[in-house]
Image: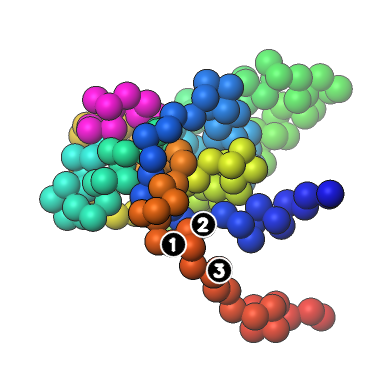
Amino acid sequence: MTIHITNFAKKRHTAKAYTPRRISDDDMAQVRDLLRFSPSSTNLQPWHFVIAETEEGKARVAKAAAEKFPFNVAAIQKASHVIVFSSRIEADEAYLQKVLEQEETDGRFAGNPDEFKPAMHNGRSMFVDIHKSQIGDAPSWLAHQVYLNLGQFLLGVATLEIDATPMEGVDTDVLDAEFDLRDKGYTSLFVVPIGYADAQADYNGALPKSRLTEAEIITSV
């Protein structure tokens, strides 16, 4: 039987409760690849991830939900792993050069480095400047790239039969302080517990998926 990517899109759901089952090391290697190989505008990759894979690590993440969002604590504590998604605060010249040098190392400019490398840098810098100096939404634009990553991530882990729970219900100031993110040039946006849903306790898994009709959301021209 042919399995289409839409099968996973229709099957996946936001898990509300987890079993103690651990994600294998092989699957976690693929999870890390999903985080790394996400698309981003101009290949900017303005993200950093903290993966809590121990009980101590998950407890540190849970601090960010304990006071304001206590209903999220159980999923954070019981999931196999929890990932903190964070965004760069600023795409400064030093960071742009780091991305550029990595692209060169990976062979992106091998055909004509004297032309392709500065062209890539100038194009990326132009978009950064548009959002920083003209539109004035640079932090929001950088965060949008992390949400692009999240979309691919949720579908990707579903193909591994791993459940996930994207959560904005965390105190990002607590996360930033707990993991020294701002000192590293980042700020947290949300967390995603991943693992295997508890079929008995995860009420959302038994509910039919509900979406607006195609006619409501798509206009063909």
Q: Is residue 57 magenta?
A: yes
Q: Position of residue 172 (x, y in %)?
A: 26, 46
Asked which quadrant contains residue 62, the reply is: top left
User: Residue lying farthest bottom?
Assistant: 216
Query: Whole-Å distance between the Cαs marked 1 and 3?
Result: 9 Å
Please indicate whether residue 45 sits to the left or right of residue 193 in the image. right
Stretch of the chain drawn in magenta: 51-60
Task: Choose between 25 and 120: the one closer to the eye.
Answer: 25
Q: How many marks?
A: 3
The answer to whether residue 7 is above or below residue 123 is below
- Residue displayed at 45% across by 38% down: 195
Disc 2 is placed on an element classified as loop
Residue at 40% x, 29% y: name it.
51
Q: Are marks 1 and 2 in contact (CB under 8 Å)?
A: yes
Q: Nearer the viewer, residue 46 or 196?
A: 196
Identity of the residue furthest to the front in this view:
200
Q: Which residue, given by chain and number where applicable, does mark 1 sit on?
A: 204
The tag on residue 27 is: none
Is residue 112 visible in this depiction of the protein?
yes
Tell me, for residue 13, which label it has, or none: 2
| Three-letter code for the amino acid on which mark 2 is drawn | His
- Name the quadrant containing residue 19: top left
Q: Residue at point 50% right, 45% down?
A: 163
* SS category of the residue bearing label 1: helix
